[in-house]
Image (cartoon, helix red, strand yellow):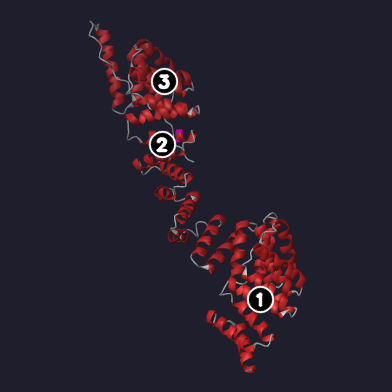
Amino acid sequence: MMKGKLGLLLALVVLVAHPAFAQTQEEHDFQQRVHEAAELYKTGRQSEATRLFEDLYQKQPHHADVLAWLGFLYLKADHADKAVPLLEEAAKARPRDLEVLTNLGNAYNSTKQYDMALVDYKTVVDLDPKMYEPQYNMGTIYLQQKDFSKARDSFQKASELRPNEPFVLNNLGVACEGLKDFKGAATAFSSASDMKTDNLTFAKNAAYAQLRLKNFSQAIPYLERAAKLDAADSTLALNLGETYAKTDRRKDALAYYEKLQDRFATSSTFWFNLGVLRAQSGDASGAETAYRKVLEISPNDLDTLNNLGLLLYQNKQYKESETLFDKLTGLNPSSRTARANLASSAALAGDTDRAIELWKELLRSMPSRVDIRQQLADALFNKGDLAGARYHYNMVVSADPTNSRALNGRGLCLLKESKLAPAVQAFNASIRSDSKFVPAYNNLAVAQERQGKRKLAIRTLKKALKIDPDNADVNKNLKRMQSAE
């Protein structure tokens, strides 16, 4: 996360009017030149002011005004090492001069004499609790020392003195983050960004702080603000798209991502997210294209292998989905879900023996998975292993007595063995469990016909057609039975 600079605040030296004493002409002239040098600085002629004060310092090296001003100018020119001795002497001459003490603290701070700086800042605060600069500068030292509690206290006081200062609020956010007060950090960062909307650092800090709290709706304005300020930040752009999606603004997310294709042509993360959004919008073909782009860039991306495999499975491209899930299980052998998907794909791709072995393996570690046991039972039945099929159908019914598919499967095993009465009972039990399960009606009709009850079988098939008028198996059996009447 971006934090922002912690720059020191300097206090401008003020020429204090002292009680009037008799002055020599020389003293008067010298003091006049001090004023002239100060005016040079105030009118923007800093280099000239510095040279004049250096000249005055050579003439009177212990003059309090000269020491204070020259120390200030050295500090402002990033020559803190030269400023320290001058400001130390000025502070001895003026121990209650708030500006001199503040600048001495800054000089100590810049030369990493942090404890000395804090002493001076605290002295200033004791003399004038409403002095803003030392509170802010103490906060910056405490941040560098990772004393986040004291940093927060200092920045809070500074913010009370200047409520509309965004830099204070940004640094307050940093301190809160250090204390793991993420809610306080988000509040401070957001306020800083709202005060200064053209500051990229503030916008990013606010956005990522809100994202940390999963305040996705609140994060969006700051993500949008930051994205406008830094169009080249790829992470920012992706986060904005993801956050649109997380707030159910999927159309906005998809439209945003579609515009970024050229910019993120080589980003696997981008193409994956685009694939997810296209799939959610019902664009299966577009999702497939995006997922294949990911695999061109990152051939072993686990999430993409899974998503593309599922997409192809849904599109009945079972052989390729089997290939993808096969690769996925090789890369992630601990994934039971990948193995289950591989087995389902293999079965529908015609590789039944492989599917059976995979299902058996899965049931050894997950014996309660009735869905897998059901698939295994169906496959064993189709292979002619009635004993194996019956065992697994019975296991499913034991775990789920109203499982219409397993009850139907149990009936098919009995029908295959010409045990017609118990087969009819099993099919009727399946229908009682699910009155719309058409395969059970069809199989019940076949069993009834074999019992010599063709008229009853025809009525059963007509009931099935009321549920699914276009069912091919039911229509075929009804036509055959009616023609035999």
Image mark for residue 93:
none
Mark 2 vs mark 1: give the one in front. Answer: 1
Picture coordinates of residue 312, whole percent (x, y): 61, 68
**Secondary structure of residue under mark 2:** helix
Which residue appears at 43% of the width and 59% of the height? 252
Badge 3 density bin: few <14, some 14–19, many ≥20, Cα 10 Å:
many
Q: In the figure, 452 relative to 204: above or below?
A: below
In the rendered structure, which amino acid carries the disc numbered 3? Answer: Gly
Q: Which residue is mark 3?
A: 105
Residue 433 left/right relative to 92 = right
Q: Secondary structure at mark 3?
A: helix
Q: Amino acid at mark 1?
A: Gln
> Which residue lies at the image location 57% right of the left edge and 81% below the top edge?
464
Q: CA distance from mark 2 to mark 1?
A: 75 Å
Nearer to me, 474 or 308: 474
The residue closer to the viewer here, 348 or 226, is 348
* Residue bearing mark 1: 425
Of the two numbered discs 1 and 3 on the same chain, state the one appearing first in sequence.
3
Q: Is residue 337 left or right of residue 118?
A: right
Between marks 2 and 3 in the image, the one whose residue lies nearer the viewer: 2
- Indicate which disc residue 170 carries: 2
Q: Visible in this render: residue 82? A: no
For the magenta stretch, what is the residue range? 169-175
Would residue 429 be found to the left or right of residue 107 on screen? right
The image shows residue 424 at horizontal and vertical percentages of 66, 78
